[in-house]
Image (cartoon, rainbow, N blue to C red):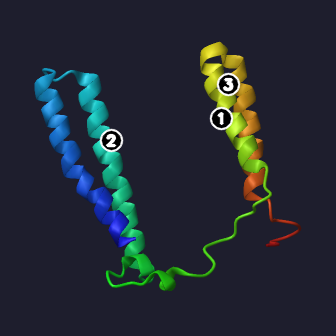
């Protein structure tokens, strides 16, 4: 996590320079300057979150500069290869974006479908009380 935190935090000065440069070049056009400043702030928030998480967890093999590939071997998580819930989530998101162009009524259908698909995906392995 330390590498990822450094990566994001190193982008903050870049966005500060880009924001000031864009502001000077565009004679401080408000929308672009605010958008670039917010991107820099969001990158900084992600970097700070990753830095705080890196302090709380044990070092990963990726954080060791002399780490070997074999150190990262093994189980990486639980992923269901036969799950259709991600497809349903993508369909809900597609309906939301299509609704922005076609009609707001379609946005509501997409939000409901996306929320149901997300709930199904989160609780895919839950059967009964606290089952895993």
Q: Position of residue 45 (x, y in %)?
A: 35, 54
> Badge 3: how crowded within 10 Å, few (<14), some, or many (20+)?
many
Q: Position of residue 110 (x, y in %)?
A: 71, 30
Which residue lies most toward the top here? 102
Q: Is residue 3 above or below residue 29?
A: below
Quadrant of the frame with the N terminus:
bottom left
Residue drawn at (32%, 80%), measured in percent from left and top? 65
Tell me which corner region of the image, top left, top right, bottom left or bottom right, holds residue 123: bottom right
Q: Secondary structure at mark 2?
A: helix
Q: Secondary structure at mark 3?
A: helix
Tell me which corner region of the image, top left, top right, bottom left or bottom right, holds residue 112: top right
* Structural distance between the alpha carbons of marks 2 and 1: 23 Å
Q: Is residue 60 visible?
A: no
Q: Which residue is mark 1?
A: 93
Which is more foreground, mark 3 or mark 1? Answer: 1
> Badge 2: how crowded within 10 Å, few (<14), some, or many (20+)?
some
Tell me which corner region of the image, top left, top right, bottom left or bottom right, holds residue 49: bottom left
Q: Position of residue 66 (x, y in %)?
A: 33, 85
Q: Is residue 59 above or below residue 107?
A: below
Mark 3 and mark 1 residues within 8 Å of each other at the beta carbon: no
Mark 2 and mark 1 residues within 8 Å of each other at the beta carbon: no
Q: Which residue is mark 3?
A: 107
Give the number of the disc on residue 65.
none
Q: Which residue is mark 2?
A: 39
Q: Is residue 27 visible?
A: yes
Q: Position of residue 34 (x, y in %)?
A: 27, 31
- Which sits earlier in the primary sequence, circle 2 or circle 1? 2
Q: Is residue 4 left or right of residue 85?
A: left
- Which sits earlier in the primary sequence, circle 3 or circle 1? 1
Quadrant of the frame with the C terminus:
bottom right
Residue drawn at (29%, 64%), measured in percent from left and top? 6
* Structural distance between the alpha carbons of marks 3 and 1: 9 Å
């Amino acid at each position: 996590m330390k590498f990822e935190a450094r990566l994001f935090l190193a982008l903050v000065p870049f966005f500060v320079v880009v924001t000031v440069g864009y502001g000077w070049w565009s004679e401080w056009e408000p929308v672009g300057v605010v958008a670039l400043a917010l991107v820099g702030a969001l990158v900084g928030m992600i970097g700070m979150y990753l830095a705080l998480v890196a302090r709380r967890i044990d070092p990963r093999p990726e954080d060791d500069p002399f780490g070997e590939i074999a150190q990262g071997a093994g189980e990486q998580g639980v992923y269901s290869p036969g799950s259709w819930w991600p497809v349903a989530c993508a369909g809900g998101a597609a309906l939301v974006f299509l609704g922005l162009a076609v009609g707001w009524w379609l946005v509501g259908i997409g939000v409901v479908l996306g929320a149901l698909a997300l709930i199904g995906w989160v609780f895919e392995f839950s059967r009964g009380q606290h089952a895993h």
